[in-house]
Image: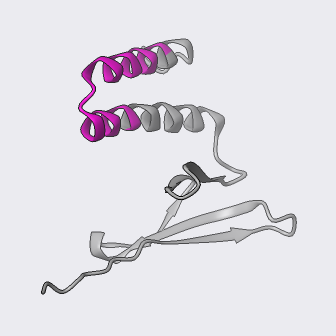
């Protein structure tokens, strides 16, 4: 019988009086990350019983809009890569990557 190993990823959110995020921190000891500051977090969790995605999307009030656009673009690209690894569906992966290119072009992220 093998021993199970557990790992923890922790998020800390400092809120203002209106419960709007002021600061975001994350810790992943196994990855060598200790209370690293972030400006945005997008987390998706699959509920297999309900067959639906639960989400947590947070960003600090001082997150610049131009950085949010880059964050979204990079997240979409990463989702395309993850989709490919998870499904091995090259055709849809290429379609998703085409959209990522279109997204970046329309937001003028690529010069």
Residue at 71% from the left image edge and 62% from the top image edge: 22
Q: Is residue 55 magenta?
A: no
Mainly helix, strand or loop, the magenta region? helix
Q: Quadrant of residue 87?
A: top left
Residue at 28% from the left image edge and 33% from the top image edge: 84
Q: Is residue 96 magenta?
A: yes
Query: Residue furthest toward the front?
Result: 49
> In which quadrant of the rendered image does the C terminus lie?
top left
> In which quadrant of the rendered image does the N terminus lie?
bottom left
Q: Is residue 69 left or right of residue 33?
A: right
Query: Residue furthest toward the right?
Result: 18
Q: Quadrant of residue 68?
A: top right
Q: Residue 47, position in %: x, y?
A: 53, 57
Residue at 48% from the left image edge and 68% from the top image edge: 26
Q: Is residue 99 left or right of residue 3?
A: right
Q: Quadrant of residue 3?
A: bottom left
In magenta, the rendered stretch is: 79-102
Q: With respect to residue 91, does 42 lie above or below?
A: below
Which is nearer the eye, 40 or 67? 40
Q: Residue 66, position in %: x, y?
A: 59, 32
Q: With respect to residue 12, does 84 lie above or below?
A: above
Q: With respect to residue 93, does 31 lie above or below?
A: below
Which is nearer the eye, 67 or 3? 3
């Amino acid at each position: 019988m093998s021993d199970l190993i557990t790992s923890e990823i922790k998020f800390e959110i400092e809120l203002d009086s209106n419960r709007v995020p002021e600061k975001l921190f994350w810790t992943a000891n196994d990855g060598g990350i200790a209370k690293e500051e972030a400006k945005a977090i997008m987390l998706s969790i699959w509920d297999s019983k309900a067959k639906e995605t639960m989400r947590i999307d947070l960003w600090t009030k001082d997150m610049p809009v131009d950085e949010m656009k880059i964050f979204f673009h990079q997240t979409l690209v990463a989702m395309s890569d993850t989709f490919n690894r998870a499904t091995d569906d090259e055709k849809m992966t290429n379609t998703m990557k085409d959209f990522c290119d279109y997204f970046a072009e329309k937001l003028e992220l690529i010069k």
